[in-house]
Amino acid sequence: MTDTVPLRVLRTLASVAETGSVTRAARALHQSSSSVSRAVQSAEATLGIRLFDRGARGVLPTAAGEVLAMRVARAMQLLRAAADGLQVRGAPASVAALPRLVSDTSLQALAARSAHLTESAAAVALGMSQPALHQALGRLEHLAKVQLFERTRIGTRLNESGRWLLLHTQQALAEIRIGHEELARWRGLTGRHVSIGSLPMAGDVLVPRAAALALAAQPDLRLAVKDGTYDALIDMLRAADIDFVVGPLRGAAAAPDLVEEVLFVDRFVAVVRAGHPLLSKLRRKGVAAQLKQMVAYPWIGALPGTPAQMAFDGLFAAAGIEPPQVSLQAHSTAVVRSVLLSGDHIALVSPLQVRAEVDGGLLVHAGGPFVGTERAIGISQRRDALASSACAHVLACLRQATVEATGNK
C-alpha cells in the first residue's frame, strides 16, 4: 500500500476541499497560504495522485480528493464528538481544541496501549520506544484535559473517559485508513482490507462462499474472518476492528447504534448422528409426539440469552413439554458437530450449520424445520458507518452467497 499522509496535513486537505480556496482554508486554520499550498503539494507527492484542480473558480477537489476529504471529514467529526463527550465527563471547554491539535501518533498510541497489557508491548507493536509512546499518551491526556488512565492492582488501564476517547479514536483511525486504501486502489495498488465478524451459523456456509466470490472477483482484497460470541463481535464492530457481523439478528432488541439487514429467515432442525437409536423410534407424527421421544436423550444447547436458546425454550413450551436436560452448552459449531458424532446427543441447529455432514451421511435431521423457531439471519453494521468500496463488494458477495444457499432472491 502507498505511504500515508499525516493527520495535520489531512486536516489541511479537508479544509481546502470544504472552502474551495487555499486562502480561505489558511484563514480557517490560522496558517499562511503558502503553508497550506505546501501541504497540498506534499500530500499529492506522497500519494502519487492529484487531489485538487486549480482554476479560475478556485481550488476544486478531484474525484480522488473528494473521497479522501470525505473520509477525513468523518474522522474529524468523530474526534469532535469525542471532545464533546469529554466535556460532559468533566473536561473544560478548551478540550474543543483536541480535534484540531491531536496527532496521529497520539491516537495510534492510545489504540495500541488499549490492545496491550503494558506500554512496552504497545511501543513494540507501533515500532517506537516506550518513552516516545509514553510522551504521546501524555500529550493526548493534556489535550483531553482529563485523566484517561487509572491505576489498579494489576496495572494501568483506561478509565471511563479514556474508553470514550478510545472508541472514537478507533473509528476515526479506521476512516483515515479507508481513505488511504481507496486512493491506493485508484493507483492500482493492493492493500484494501475487510474484516468480517462471523457467528457460528454464518461461518459454515455464507461467509466462506462470500469470501470465495469476493476474492475471485477482486484478488487484491485482504479478508479477515473473526468469530466469537455476539456481544464480543459487536464490541469489535463498535471499535471498527471489524466492518460488519453476519449471523442471527436481534431485531427489536438490537442496540440503537446498530442497523440490521435481513438476508433470510431460518428455522431450526433437530440433528443426530447417523445410526442414532432415536431414528428407529420416530414413527409418531406431530411435533409434540416427536419432542416427547427426544427428551429422553442428552441435548446440546445454545448459550443463554441467544436467539437459539430462546427458540429452544419456545419450541418445547409451545408443545407443552418440559424442556429436556441440557448437558452441554456450546457456541462453536465444531464442538457441536464433534459431540453429535461421538454419542447420542441431540442438537437444535440451523440446517446450514450441518449441511456438509448431512449431505455426507454423517448427521441426520431427526425433526423439523420446526414452526415457531424462526430467526432472522443477516448483517449487523454500525448505524453511522459508511462502507468502503471493498466492504461494499464483500457485502454484495454475501448477498449472492445467501441466494445460492437458500434459493431466496
Image: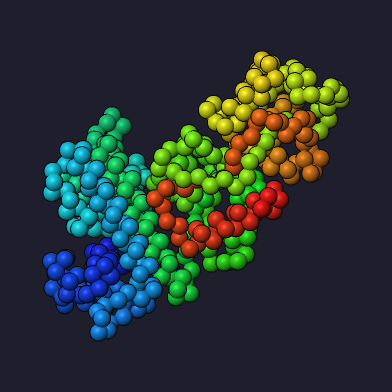
Instruction: Work out whether 278 lies above or below 12.
Output: above
Tell me residue 195's x, y (percent). Answer: 49, 53
Instruction: Work out whether 223 lies above or below 27.
Output: above
Tell me residue 394's x, y (percent). Answer: 55, 58
| Pick the front one: 129 or 10 | 10
Question: Who's the residue at 75% across and 18% down the image?
Answer: 292
Tell me residue 372's x, y (percent). Answer: 66, 29
Tell me residue 263's x, y (percent). Answer: 60, 47
Describe residue 247's horizontal placement relative to residue 180 as left or right. right
Instruction: Work out whether 116 lies above or below 373.
Output: below
Question: Who's the residue at 37% across and 58% down the image?
Answer: 175
Question: Who's the residue at 51% across and 37% down the image?
Answer: 251
| Pick the front one: 303 or 21 | 21
Instruction: Work out whether 197 lies above or below 189.
Output: above
Quadrant assignment, res 3:
bottom left
Q: Residue furthest bottom?
A: 56
Describe residue 409's horizontal placement relative to residue 344 as left or right. left
Question: Which quarter of the rendering shows the N terminus?
Answer: bottom left
Q: Count how many numbered circles sit on residues in the image.
A: 0
Evaluate whether residue 81 shows in this view: yes
Describe residue 197's horizontal placement relative to residue 365 as left or right. left
Question: Who's the residue at 24% across and 58% down the image?
Answer: 103
Evaluate whether residue 118 shows in this view: no
Describe residue 253's horizontal placement relative to residue 334 as left or right. left
- The way the protein has been coloured in the rendering is rainbow
